[in-house]
Amino acid sequence: MTNSKKLRYGFTTGSAAAFAAKAAACDLLLGFIPKDISVMTPKQIHYSPSYKNPQRGVVEVQKFAGDDPDVTDGMTIRAIVRVEPSSSVIVVIDGGKGVGRVTKPGLDQPVGNAAINHVPRQMITENVLEVCRAADFLGKINVIIEADGGEEIAKKTFNPRLGIVGGISILGTTGIVEPMSDAALVDTIRVEIHQRSVLGEKKLLMAFGNYGQEFLLQDYGIDLDTAVMCSNFIKDALTIAEEEGFIEILLVGHLGKIVKVAGGFSNTHSKYGDCRMELLTSALLKSRADCTIDDARRLSQMNTTEEAADFLADKGYLSDVMSVIMSEIHDTISRWIPDVEVHLMVYTVNQRLIGKD
């Protein structure tokens, strides 16, 4: 009998910031925070967390990510609300301590702005304006969003690569966090590719992950920051690159990941299957009529592609096998993005570069 426990969804930093801002505005303009206070997320789910109110116009909320492995889970999101005289109602939002600032173009916010995306900004504005109407307030409302420990936590996110410095981003398009969301990872890849497109780049360097980046740096002196990491989402990343107008892509991958593309896998995560040895054995039989049945059997029973590549190199098969694998990878990719020129660099830790075109 399997354990089918339902995973809990959480709420975004954007929802936490919007609730904290609304509660702080109530405290400052109404003189109290209603017991039934909540905000409505874009997903049409009410959000009413517990909170702290350490001083007038300041509210703190603890971020809850549900069962998603989110590095921001449990951190304190704070809203500080202050007012100034004005002839009309104006809501001005900025980031304070622990919230990052945008330094590169191509992101949701322009360079110089706090990394508070447009949906959270809209949620904050709408909820604060609701309080202004209830209080019959006329003036300027300044909302500062802070995130305790944000500068350190941001180092565990994509923010440094995206050019967001000094803290985390206040994010969320739906207001909730779906557990183990692949969509969030693909969205991050999309942002990184879009940034390069905005800068006018037409050629893209793509790697599956840190191993690929280390290989590029150690063997070719190519800076890690110039490569987009596609993780397991190879088809998504390549398709996004085509949509963003790139005409040429250099894809760098460890044999253990990229060989799955030869088998037509659009996602290289092990949960979608493992055909690595079958593909390598098939390539051996296709390319070398002189290989022995024993060699083919031994290859098919190996556990890792590192072991397989070493074996093929020792037997003198590696170059021919890789010719077949490279051709099959190109066949798969050409079905996904037929109008983009794609080049490959395939490596292993021991053999280093084993395939290039």
Image: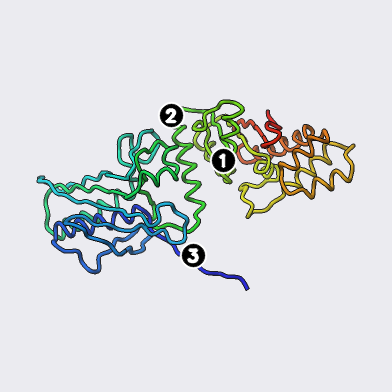
Residue under numbered circle 1: 209
> The residue under label 2 is which amino acid type?
Leu
Residue behind mark 2 = 199
Tell us which disc is closer to us: 1 or 2: 1
In the rendering, at what x and y percent does residue 41 appear? 34, 59
Image coords of residue 217 (percent x, y): 56, 30
Quarter of image, res 203: top right
Marking on residue 304: none
**Total number of numbered labels?**
3
Left or right of residue 62, residue 93 in this image: left
**Element marked by disc 1:** loop
Labels 1 and 2: the sequence-earlier one: 2
User: Which residue is painted at 18% across and 59% down in the image?
Assistant: 26
**The C terminus lies in quadrant:** top right
Q: Is residue 317 above or below residue 4?
A: above
Q: Looking at the image, what colour scheme do you see?
A: rainbow
- Asked if residue 13 is positioned above or below residue 5 in the image, the reply reads above
What whole-number distance in Å separates the C-alpha atoms at marks 3 and 2?
A: 40 Å
> What amino acid type should be assigned to the residue bearing mark 3?
Leu
Which residue is denoted by mark 3 in the rendering?
Answer: 7
Which element type, helix, strand or loop, lies under badge 3?
loop
Report x, y in % for residue 185.
Answer: 49, 48
Residue in the picture at 57% in, 37% down? 207
Residue 354 lies, in percent from the top left, at 71, 32
- Counting residues from the N terminus, which is met first, the one under dot 3 or under dot 1? 3
Residue lying farthest to the top in this orientation: 221
Q: Amino acid at mark 1?
A: Gly
